[in-house]
Image: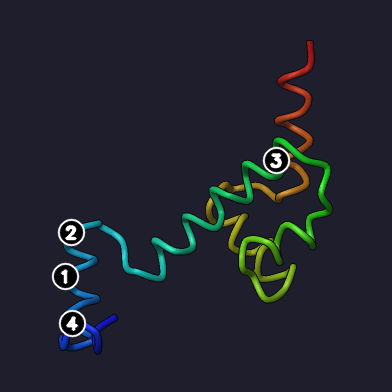
């Protein structure tokens, strides 16, 4: 992207962070984890496949990132959400 607009990579990152409030990496991770939460709520897809579908290389890196984002594991998130939405 920086090459396309003939801008410094670092300038582009600083500008993105200043405008959005997150680094490009944090922003991408938030999008991935938000997608994962939706899949956990709406499908029975195994967690390892969800991790792969949203762009994580390993299940363990997905679980670690998810815990930091939601303060719970993906499995617990799915279970808690399912229990709170049963009729």
- Kindly report the distance in space between the C-alpha atoms of the residues bearing marks 3 and 2: 31 Å
Mark 3 or mark 2, which has the lower sequence index?
Answer: 2
Image-based side of 12 in relation to 52, left or right: left
Q: Tag 2's secondary structure?
A: helix
The percent position of residue 7, horizontal first and vertical second, equals: 15, 86
- Kindly report the distance in space between the C-alpha atoms of the residues bearing marks 4 and 1: 13 Å
Mark 1 Cα-neighbour bin, 10 Å: few <14, some 14–19, many ≥20: few
- Kindly report the distance in space between the C-alpha atoms of the residues bearing marks 1 and 2: 6 Å
Residue at the (68%, 45%) spot, across then down: 39
Q: Tag 4's secondary structure?
A: loop
Mark 4 Cα-neighbour bin, 10 Å: few <14, some 14–19, many ≥20: few
- Kindly report the distance in space between the C-alpha atoms of the residues bearing marks 4 and 2: 17 Å
56 and 1: which is toward the camera = 1
Q: Which residue is mark 4?
A: 5
Q: Is residue 64 above or below residue 4?
A: above
Q: Which residue is mark 1?
A: 15
Mark 2 Cα-neighbour bin, 10 Å: few <14, some 14–19, many ≥20: few
Q: Is residue 80 above or below residue 27?
A: above
Find out whether the residues at labels 4 and 2 contact each other: C-beta distance under 8 Å. Answer: no
Report the quarter where the N terminus lies: bottom left
Mark 3 Cα-neighbour bin, 10 Å: few <14, some 14–19, many ≥20: some
The percent position of residue 41, horizontal first and vertical second, equals: 70, 36
Q: Is residue 85 above or below residue 78?
A: above
Mark 3 or mark 4, which has the lower sequence index?
Answer: 4
Q: Which residue is mark 3?
A: 77
Between circles 3 and 4, the one closer to the viewer is 4
């Amino acid at each position: 992207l920086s090459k396309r607009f003939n801008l410094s990579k670092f300038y582009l990152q600083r500008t993105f962070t200043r405008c959005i409030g997150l680094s490009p990496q944090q922003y991408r991770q938030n999008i991935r984890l938000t997608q994962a939460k939706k899949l956990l709520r709406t499908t029975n897809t195994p967690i390892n496949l969800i991790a792969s579908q949203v762009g994580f290389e390993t299940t363990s890196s997905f679980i670690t990132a998810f815990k930091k984002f939601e303060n719970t594991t993906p499995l617990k998130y799915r279970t808690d959400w399912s229990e709170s939405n049963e009729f």
